Amino acid sequence: MSQSFGERLRTALQTHGPLCVGIDPHAALLDSWNLPQSADGVRTFGLRVVEAAAEQVGVVKPQVSFFERFGSRGYAALEDVLAAAREAGLLIVADAKRGDLDTTMAAYGEAWFGSGSPLEADALTLSPILGPDSLRDVLATALAGGKGAFVLGATSNPDGEIVQRARTVDAGAGDDESVARRVAREVAALDPVPQDGESLGSIGLVIGATIDRSRFGLDDEILASSPILAPGFGAQGAEPADLVARFGAVSRNVLASESRSILSAGSSGIVDRIRQRAALYQENHGV
């Protein structure tokens, strides 16, 4: 793969704007879509979302857990949805929030980043709770294959602040920074790109759209070239018009993730809902 994930993401943002459509077939949505609570139900749901999103947005984000709950058949359904998204030319962020050590992370890298893998995605969400260094090898695997990742940085759940805003001090170094800022600094160091306001790295952060990122130490400078996956738009309260106000100079790096606010339109209304929401983001994003 000749282009990096960051380069492909920048093209998608410039072409389609920042809207990222979540594929979250949870139980209530399956019911409202008149689909069965089964692997067949989540397969049909996911394929319909992909079809509706194609050529309207650049990125989709399947939530792996909603497929995983149906076991091997659920994973088979997810594989079909991922294949359809690839065929449609959509970038795929697999929302799996994996995080472990050594050989376990190597296996996750093969599963989600391996060329030709049934679960192959363009990017994966990762948890740094075992320390940023625990992700070093899997991130190297991603970069080597032209893939990307979004590492949990500052999430919108209130309990997240307990860990993410905690201060970390290196023995003997005297450094004092938040956990979120340290994660941002260390993962960005693995994928240095020019600080030219245009180049976009392939390793970024998950930052909730409804939080004050300055409280976590995530200023414009440290995020200048980092892609940002921002859940919290739509049903959680943030709106397209808020994107620039909330993310300022780094708003051009943001994928604004919406799920329920779009999926609640149902099978018959989702195409129009995506079109409407995408247009609002494009208007506020200068696309």
Image (spheres, helix red, strand yellow):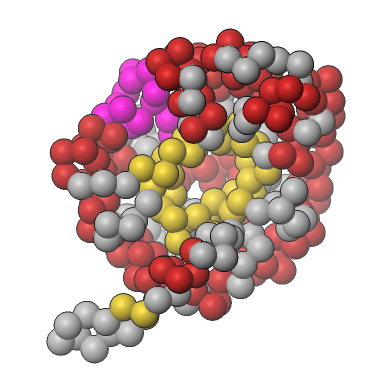
In x, y percent, where is residue 89?
A: 56, 24
Front position in the image: 48 or 165? 165
Q: Residue at image x 44%, y 55%?
A: 152
Q: Main secondary structure of the magenta part?
A: loop
- Using residue 6 as the reference point, say whether residue 192 is left or right of it: left
- Using residue 17 as the reference point, say whether residue 129 is left or right of it: left
In x, y percent, where is residue 130?
A: 27, 57
Q: Is residue 120 magenta?
A: yes
Q: Residue at image x 58%, y 15%?
A: 38
Front position in the image: 207 or 254? 207
Quarter of the image containing the N terminus? top left
Image label count? 0
| Res. 273 in view | yes
- Using residue 78 as the reference point, say whether residue 231 is left or right of it: right
217 versus 97 height, above or below? below
Front position in the image: 28 or 151? 28
In x, y percent, where is residue 212?
A: 61, 72
246 versus 273 height, above or below? below
171 versus 238 height, above or below? below
190 versus 178 height, above or below? above
Q: Residue at image x 16%, y 38%?
A: 103
Q: Residue at image x 27%, y 82%?
A: 169
| Res. 16 in view | no
Front position in the image: 146 or 107? 107
- The image quadrant that residue 222 belongs to is bottom left
**Magenta-highlighted residues:** 110-122
In x, y percent, where is residue 146?
A: 35, 37
Q: Is residue 258 magenta?
A: no
